[in-house]
Amino acid sequence: MDFSLSDEERAIRDTARQFITREVMPLEQEALRRERAHRPGLERSELRELQLKAKEFGFWGLSTPEEYGGMELPAVTQSLIWTEVGRTFVQFKFGGDADNILYFANDEQKKEYLLPTIEGERISCFAITEPGAGSDAANIKLRARQDGDDWVLNGEKTFITNGNDADFVIVVAVTDPEKGVRGGGTTAFLVDRAMGWRSEFIQTMGEGGPASLIFDDVRVPARNILGEIGQGFELGMKWIGKGRYLIPSNAIGIAERALGMAVEYANTRETFGKPIATNQAIQWMIADSETELEAARWLILRAAWTVDQGADPRHSSSMAKLYGAGMVNRVVDRVMQIHGGMGYTRELPIERWYRQVRLMRIYEGTDEMQRLIISRDLLRGYTKIGGHLQ
C-alpha cells in the first residue's frame, strides 16, 4: 500500500502552489480591504487576468476534456490542486471549466453555451434549489408549461451561486407534474438572462452572496432544452455529485494555512514570560487539529481515487464531505481561540475563514444529508463496513 504521490502529481501540485503563492496571495491585503468596504475582493476583469496568467503555467480546464482544450486531469490531481487554491482566501479559481452537465448539450448548444463558457466569455449558473426545496431537491415547484414551440417558466430558485453575475442559467423545472420529479417529470433548460429572468442578491454572513432567480412568464424556445425532456432531475444529481470531494479538498488548504498561522503565533506570542506554545491547552488544540486534518486528507483523496477507478463514489464522497467540512470548522475555531482577540479582528483573515467555512456544512449536501446517505448505504446493504478493503 503506497501513500506517496507520483512524480507527476507532485510536480503539478508544486506548480499550482507556486502560482497561488506568487500571483494570488500578494493580493490578500487588498482583497481584505475591499471586502471591509463591501466590495468584491476580486473584480471580474482581475479574475480573468489571473486565469490567463495561470493558463501560461499550463492550468486551464482542470476537468475539461482534452478535445475542448482542457487538461482532463484525474480526480486525485484535481483534489490536490483545489487544496492549493484553498490556501488563499482570495476568491480565485482556475479558468477553462464549465458545468459538467453542459457536455450533454447538442452541437448548436455547445457552440452557444459550452465553448464560450470554457473560454471565459460567458458565465453560467446552475439552479435547482428553491425556497421549499433545498436538501429535498425532489420537491421543486418551478413550472415549465409548453406553449407551441416554446416553454414558459414561472417560479423561483434560491441560493444560486454565481446567480448575480451569470448571463445564462441551467435551470431544472417541472414539465410533467403527473410523472413526479423522480419519475421523469422535470427538464433542464438553458435560459439566457436576456430572456427575462432576474436575480436578487441574498445577504449572508460570508463574503459575496448567492442569488434568488425570479422567473415570471419567461419564454424559452424548445431548442434550449438541455439533454432530453424528463432528464432534468437526473442531470441535477450529476451536477450536485461532482463537487462533493472538491469542496473538502479546498477545506484541506484552508485548514493547513490556518493551522500554520496558529503554530507560528503560538511560538511567538508570550504570556507570563513564556510563549503560549508551552501551555498544554494550546498544544492539545494544535495536536487535535493536525490529527483531524490528516484524517480528512486521506478520506478525501480516497474519494477522489474512487472516482478515478470508475467506481461509484457516492459513499466515499459523502464521508469526505461530512468529515472534511466538520474538520475545517473545528480547526479554524481553534486557530481563532489560539489567536485570542486578534483572531476576532478583521486585521487577520481568521474571522473571514470562520464565516466562509461554515457554509461548507450546508451547501452541496448538508451534514445531515451526508449522514443519511452514509447510513442508508450500510442499512440497506448497498455497501459493507470497510467495503473498500473487502
Image (tube, rainbow, N blue to C red):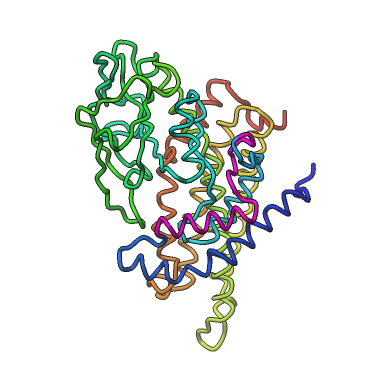
Q: Is residue 42 above or below residue 343?
A: above
- Report the side of 182 relative to 322 (left or right): left
Identify which residue is drawn at 26% across, 48% down.
201
Q: Main secondary structure of the magenta part?
A: helix
Q: Give whichever of 232, 145 is nearer the camera.
A: 145
Q: Image quadrant of residue 138?
A: top left
User: Where's the C terminus, which quadrant?
Assistant: top right
Instruction: Please tell me which residue lies in front, 73 or 89.
Output: 73
Residue furthest to the top in view is: 178
Residue 67: x and y in percent read: 63, 34
Magenta highlight range? 43-67
Question: Residue shown at 54%/26% (left/top)?
Answer: 377
Residue situated in front as seen by the camera: 374 or 320 = 320
The residue at the point 52 percent across, 29 percent down is 103
Q: Residue at x 27, y 38 (%)?
A: 213
Is 134 part of what is drawn in magenta?
Answer: no
Question: Going by the image, does 289 lie left or right of 168?
Answer: right
Q: Quadrant of residue 385?
A: top right
| Relative vertical location of residue 188 with respect to residue 162 in this rendering, above or below | above
Q: Position of residue 19 (x, y in %)?
A: 61, 61
